[in-house]
Amino acid sequence: CHDNTFRRGVLRMGPSTSGPGSPQASIVMYNANDNLIENVIAIDGQANSDTDNSAFYITGHDPPADISGNKYYGIISLNNWGVGFWVSNGGPSDGNELHNSVLWSSQNAGLSFQCPGVSCLNEVIDHITLAGSASLGMYLDGPTISITNSIIGQNAGVGINGVNATVATLDYSDFFSNTGGDYFGVSAGANNITIGGGGTNLVGG
């Protein structure tokens, strides 16, 4: 599943809750390289996997399990069970990118990279809004990643939990009102700000 383009879709896992089983998501790139996902909405998904579930998922485990170079532009994950945007792999997962997107009200973390012990280099997160997750904002285990020009606020856990992550750039972003604090295991960039608390409530109006 390489070199494909998927645009302008609205996806929902439902309307009823799915049964348990293998990893489930609104759209999965499995053992897939160099794909483009653009202007796709995953809404109100009720994936009920007993392993992994998410809205947008990049994964692979069968050799060679390479999931590199996938690009996501203008996606929206809204009110989905599981993780909003998830990269989890048993092999190389380099150069995946997420731009100009919204990850809103995920039941689990809004965004997660889980690639310990494998190549997980040059990942890019830019111009995203990540809010209202019932868990962490971002969970980073293993990647070398750049996070810029983004808003991460009002998540039930830490804004970014960096476990064994190398954050090459974390700058020009707004972190606020994350219940567990804004950063764990990573440091703010010089141009990050903390505004939006006070009378501003992104989640709930």
Image: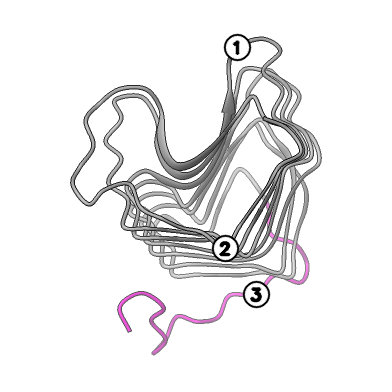
Q: In the image, residue 72 lies at what x, y percent?
A: 66, 53
Could you tell me which residue is drawn at 77 percent across and 33 percent down? Answer: 94
Q: Earlier in the sequence, mark 2 or mark 3?
A: 2
Q: Could you tell me which secondary element the residue under label 2 belongs to? A: loop
Residue placed most toward the observer, 70 or 10: 10
Q: In the image, residue 133 lies at what x, y percent?
A: 38, 57
Give the magenta part as a residue range. 187-205
Question: How many numbered discs?
Answer: 3
Relative to 116, does residue 153 appear above or below in the rendering?
below
Q: In the image, residue 134 lies at what x, y percent?
A: 33, 54
The residue to which callout 1 is attached is 62
Residue 189 lies in the magenta-colored region: yes
How many residues crowd mark 1 within 10 Å: few (<14), some (14–19), many (20+)? Answer: few
Tell me the CA gap for discs 2 and 1: 29 Å
How many residues crowd mark 2 within 10 Å: few (<14), some (14–19), many (20+)? Answer: few
The residue to which callout 3 is attached is 193
Residue placed most toward the observer, 200 or 104: 104
Q: Could you tell me which secondary element the residue under label 3 belongs to? A: loop
Relative to 177, does residue 147 appear above or below in the rendering?
above
Nearer the observer, disc 2 or disc 3?
2
Q: Earlier in the sequence, mark 3 or mark 1?
A: 1
Which image quadrant is residue 22 in? top left
Could you tell me which residue is drawn at 67 percent across and 9 percent down? Answer: 63
The residue to which callout 2 is attached is 8
For the C terminus, which image quadrant?
bottom left
Could you tell me which residue is drawn at 76 percent across and 72 percent down? Answer: 191
Q: Are marks 3 and 1 in contact (CB under 8 Å)?
A: no
For the N terminus, which image quadrant?
top right
Residue 199 lies in the magenta-colored region: yes
Q: Are marks 2 and 3 in contact (CB under 8 Å)?
A: no
